[in-house]
Image (cartoon, rainbow, N blue to C red):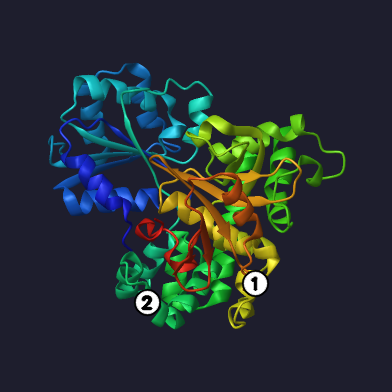
Amino acid sequence: MDRFLMKKLVAWKINRNRKPLILNGARQVGKTWLLKEFGRQYFTNAAYINLDNNPRMMSQFDLDFNTERLLLAFEVETGEQIVPGKTLIILDEIQECPKALTSLKYFSENAPEQMIVAAGSLLGITIHAGSGYPVGKVDSMDLYPLNFREFLEATGNTNLRKLIESNHTEMAESFSTKLIPLLKQYYFVGGMPEVVKIFLDTNNFGEVRRTQQNILQGYERDISKHMTASEIEYTLAAWNSIPAHLAQENKKFIFGHIKKGARAREYRSAITWLSQAGLATRVTRISDPGIPLSGYAQDNVFKLFLLDVGLLGAMVGLDPSSMLDSRTIFTGFKGALTEQYVCQQLISDGGFTPFYWSADNSRGEIDFIVQKGSDIFPIEVAAEENLRSKSLRAFTDKYTGMHPLRFSLSPFKDRAWMRNIPLYECTNVNLWK
């Protein structure tokens, strides 16, 4: 299946000022496949080395950081001849070997002609653990589950993907009877590559669910593997509480809702771990919509989303029959799946860092706020068909100069004070302004 990040990998390859590349991402988002496919399509050969449970190669980094010696070790390990500019060197699971991570600095300085890419699943945690991360000596990219446009491509709906990328809003409305059922499928299947493949191979939603449950169990094993006994308890409790938080009218993460008597100081490190592992996304509250938005963030007040809408549905046991109902999958569960979907698309497809805003008196909330250059876009997510937008209107009246948006199932409409964007076109920024 095509991943849109491939274009960025190709741009990295032809950049004369490139550095060794680190591909970040949670487990099971397709990092290994993408890098191998990158090597297959754009290089003569690839030297692939998996550092997980590989003491033979890990010992090579213990000796020193002599790049000539390490390149020879790569050739011996893989059986490939490494030719600068023609061979892609792939170091997988690099978080398992901190010294391999450090070695990228020396490849950047002493062997810049070599094309080296590294992939890791818990690099956010490794970096904060003081692993000798080569700051300033590497390039980095982030890979996420398939976004909706990639899902359309994977399911053979290339022409619909092109349509929602265009500005032909009236035509898109005409074909909404095709787009909305596919959006329902995406809500259920999500964007985890293995799950999408199972869906394409079997068209069986039971198999889809089983695969999602296996991935969730794998994440819980990761938590148990990398944390102490007390940390495991807190982290699993926080992880399992995310769906319940999103099912509330006010989706703000409240530590006391994890369990009775829970305190922030007990669970703060658990939330940090989940975020750094890429399993959860913190959407922080801002006090005022100033530029830059990050300057107004209140780090201790946030919503917590999962990495994938399909996994959220699996955690709450969403039944496949919900896709037969015209609106249940969008409006049920307090619209949590729709907010999760929008959050996911803003990050993985739009490249945004989303925030949210709420009034100090708790009356009125803007689901997401993003910044693009000097423009600020407050976003209301409307899963219901009742599109009153009271909070968005009040916010816009209070803070002028914004570009308010509403993402809903209704057709595109440019009103005097706000634009309504269909959910299936929500990341087409050409429609935003």
Q: Quadrant of residue 16?
A: top left
The relative height of residue 184 versus residue 112 in the rendered view (above or below) is below
Left/right placement of residue 293 relative to residue 58 reads right
Q: Position of residue 280 (x, y in %)?
A: 58, 46
In this view, the residue in front, 271 or 336, is: 336
Q: Quadrant of the C terminus?
A: bottom left
| Residue at numbered disc 1 | 386
Give the CA distance from mark 2 to mark 1.
Answer: 22 Å
Q: Position of residue 167 (x, y in %)?
A: 32, 67
Q: Residue at coordinates 17% horizontally, 50% vertically from top-left?
A: 42
Mark 2: which amino acid? Glu
Work out whether residue 311 can be spotted: no
The relative height of residue 20 versus residue 367 in the rendered view (above or below) is above
In this view, the residue in front, 5 or 87, is: 5
Left/right placement of residue 288 relative to residue 47 reads right
Left/right placement of residue 123 relative to residue 316 reads left
The relative height of residue 358 versus residue 217 in the rendered view (above or below) is above
